[in-house]
Amino acid sequence: MPARQSPNNPKTAIRKPKKLSREEIEEVFRRFSAANPEPKGELEYTNAFTLLVAVVLSAQATDVGVNKATRDLFAVADTPEKMAALGVEGVSRYIRTIGLFNGKAKNVVALSELLIERHGGEVPTTREELEALPGVGRKTANVVLNIFFGQPTIAVDTHLFRVGNRTGLAPGANPLKVELALMKAVPGWAMLHAHHWLILHGRYVCKARVPECWRCLIADICRHEPKTPAPVAKGGGLAPPR
């Protein structure tokens, strides 16, 4: 009996999908573009600083949950100076509903202080400078660079990692390998929006437990097998969309 696939056991056999061809990748993004020409992120922000804070807070949390907490927070602290003045306890009071809020509050205050000290209160525009801030890793830096500064970066979260591997778009053993594979594979014209198209596809269609293949724009191109059939309602007919 073949080994059962397990993401937690490196000794088990994991069958990698065949990578999509250049022509197939071009078609994937053509379809995403046709369906959603101007995709947007779902985190709420008012400037580069509030976007940076929102992304830091979004680690292991949902965008919906982060938005609920930051609406009141950003109303009183939308600059590094105001955020630092709140202090860790002050920030914590606003973000208690977010997982790991104590550690995140410390990072938000610390990065605010460093922005004031090193960058005159402005959010830097390079990955290296962003990653030097507390709580900011490669993924967070890429999100800020892409969304606010319009740089062609791709931030690989759990959704992009899954989509890249499952579809054959950019198979890779870890997020960095998937990111680098996507940077090579994505057509130049699609680079700016690729991050958003893929994260939205992974969040709402190519879901982790049960991908909704029956309503996928790229099901005929995707390497994932077997495709998930459309759900059937009791008494016949297709079940209503979830």
Image: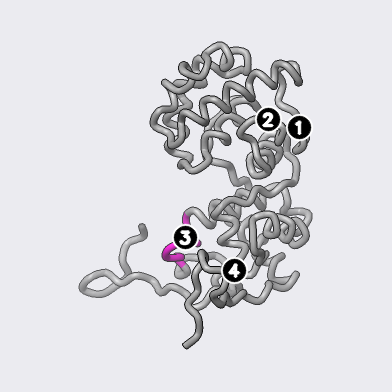
Q: Image point 45% across, 70% down: which residue?
A: 214
Per the image, label 3 sits on a secondary structure element best described as loop
> Can you tell which mark lies on residue 133?
2
Tell me the residue that label 1 is attached to: 129
Q: Image point 52% across, 66% down: which residue?
A: 7
Question: Is any atom of residue 195 visible in this view?
Answer: yes
Question: Is any atom of residue 220 visible in this view?
Answer: no
Do the residues under discs 2 and 1 have CB atoms within 8 angstroms? yes
Quadrant in which residue 173 is drawn: bottom right
The mark that comes first in sequence, 3 or 4, is 4
Tell me the residue that label 4 is attached to: 167
Task: Measure the C-alpha gap from mark 2 to mark 3.
Answer: 32 Å
Per the image, label 4 sits on a secondary structure element best described as helix
Per the image, label 1 sits on a secondary structure element best described as helix
Mark 1 Cα within 10 Å, few/some/many (few <14, many 20+)?
some
> Can you tell which mark lies on residue 207?
3
Amino acid type at mark 4: Thr
Do the residues under discs 2 and 4 have CB atoms within 8 angstroms? no
Task: Measure the C-alpha gap from mark 3 to mark 4.
Answer: 12 Å
Magenta span contains residue 65: no
* Image position, residue 144 (x, y; %): 66, 36
Per the image, label 2 sits on a secondary structure element best described as loop
